[in-house]
């Protein structure tokens, strides 16, 4: 606690507040050069398609390896990056990294997988965002249909002309949009239906509550039914327990992601996952022969 100061008890609360503000400023100033200093790394978590048993995509999750503080998880710095605007540069770096990594992991794969990238509302509201996406696709050579952009419910509910133009442009590019953390916020069904969204990702908290006494099962059932009615793929994230996986299978959930299946890990670790689509066998000319 702060030391008492002579001018009155109210000031007792000022020092911790000030410390927090200073810590935040320090974090923000360190973060500004993090991309240039190569301190950011991307890990990937596989998304398993329950219908095929194969990894359908991998979600890019950024980590900050600070030289003194160690690994800083995204929940600790993404909010600061959003409020200062550094998220625009960080997000572009993650997007490009993810596209190049997806191309490399797909080399010679019989059925290529997709890569899933989180987009914060601040990035999507930036007028140059669609162009940034286009450039990342062109430069890396990743087909647009292999890129899934996860947007949040706040973007879904943003009816500003900039957000609408960005979403329309992304649709024209042919990238897939997914709504992250679905069920945690307050998207209206009408908005979801009106948007060119291809998937819904059930919030991990709802998935965890499948095991609780007061089960979230009715809500998860409703989301999966809604996904089916609107022709959207439904993905459950945060799957940690067998009984959650069993319930999701039973309810007809399309895809799952969570510690039970795999933790986020560097690309090299993902590339060894036996559930990835098989590699093609090459003939002497180097032409891929489909593996039977
Ligand atoms: P998210 O997009 O909802 O990602 C899912 C989070 O749940 C990840 O946390 C992941 O590591 C974690 N997770 C996966 N499986 C399990 C599980 O079985 N149990 C539990 N308890 N957690 C699980 P992470 O990597 O710490 O990321 C947190 C959030 O930070 C992400 O939530 C996303 O909103 C944001 N984020 C991460 N990378 C980026 C990025 O490149 N750009 C932006 N804008 N946001 C990002
Ligand atoms: Mg996500
Ligand atoms: Mg999520
Ligand atoms: Mg989340």
Image (cartoon, rainbow, N blue to C red):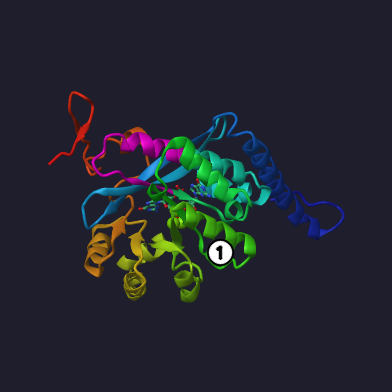
Figure check: 157 above or below 237: below
State the image coordinates of residue 92 (x, y, percent, origin top left): 55, 42
Is residue 186 or residue 281 the one in the foreground? 281
Residue at the right extreme of this rendering:
7
Say if 82 sits above or below 290 in the image: below
Quadrant in which the C terminus is drawn = top left
The stretch in magenta equals 97-116
Q: Which residue is drawn at 50% across and 54% down?
A: 170
Q: Position of residue 45 (x, y in %)?
A: 36, 45
* Figure quadrant of residue 24: top right
Q: Which residue is drawn at 21% across and 24% down?
A: 285
Count of marks placed on residues: 1
> Going by the image, does 130 lie left or right of 276?
right
**Residue 57 visible here:** yes
Residue under pointer 1: 154
Q: Does the residue labelled 1 lie within 8 Å of ligand 1?
A: no
Residue 172 percent across, percent down from the top left: 48, 55
Q: Where is residue 247 in the image (x, y as percent from the top left)?
A: 25, 66
Residue 72 appears in the picture as rendered: no
What crowding class fits label 1: few (fewer than 14 Cα within 10 Å), some (14-19), or many (20 or more)?
A: some
Residue at screen point 22% across, 63% down: 246
Q: In which quarter of the image is residue 215?
A: bottom left
Depth order, front residue of 3/27: 27
Q: Is residue 201 magenta?
A: no
- Whether residue 158 sits left or right of residue 196 in the image: it is right
Q: Which of 141 and 8 is in front in this view?
A: 141
Label 1 element class = helix
User: Which residue appears farthest toward the top when viewing the image?
Assistant: 284
Left or right of 159 in this view: 45: left
| Residue 110 inside the magenta-drawn segment | yes
The answer to which of 117 and 166 lies nearer the viewer is 166
């Amino acid at each position: 606690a702060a030391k008492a100061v002579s001018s009155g008890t109210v000031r007792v609360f000022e020092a911790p507040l000030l410390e927090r503000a200073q810590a935040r400023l320090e974090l923000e100033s360190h973060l500004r050069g993090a991309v240039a200093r190569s301190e950011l790394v991307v890990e990937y978590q596989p998304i398993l398609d329950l219908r095929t048993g194969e990894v359908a995509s991998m979600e890019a999750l950024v980590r900050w390896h600070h030289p003194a503080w160690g690994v800083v998880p995204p929940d600790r710095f993404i909010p600061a990056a959003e409020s200062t605007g550094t998220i625009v540069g960080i997000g572009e770096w993650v997007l490009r990294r993810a596209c190049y990594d997806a191309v490399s992991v797909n080399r010679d794969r019989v059925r290529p997988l997709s890569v899933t990238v989180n987009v914060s509302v601040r990035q999507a509201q930036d007028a140059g965002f669609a162009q940034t996406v286009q450039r990342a696709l062109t430069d890396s050579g990743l087909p647009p249909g292999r890129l899934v952009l996860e947007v949040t419910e706040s973007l879904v509910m943003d009816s500003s002309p900039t957000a609408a133009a960005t979403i329309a442009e992304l649709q024209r590019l042919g990238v897939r949009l997914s709504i992250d953390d679905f069920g945690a916020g307050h998207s209206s069904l009408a908005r979801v239906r009106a948007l060119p969204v291809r998937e819904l990702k059930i919030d991990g908290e709802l998935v965890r509550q499948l095991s609780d006494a007061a089960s979230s099962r009715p809500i998860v059932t409703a989301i999966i039914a809604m996904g089916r009615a609107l022709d959207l793929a439904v993905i459950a994230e945060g799957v940690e327990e067998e009984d959650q996986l069993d319930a999701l299978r039973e309810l007809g959930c399309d895809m799952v992601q969570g510690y039970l299946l795999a933790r986020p890990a560097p690309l090299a670790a993902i590339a060894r996952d036996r559930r990835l689509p098989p590699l093609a066998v090459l003939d002497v000319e180097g032409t891929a022969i489909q593996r039977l």
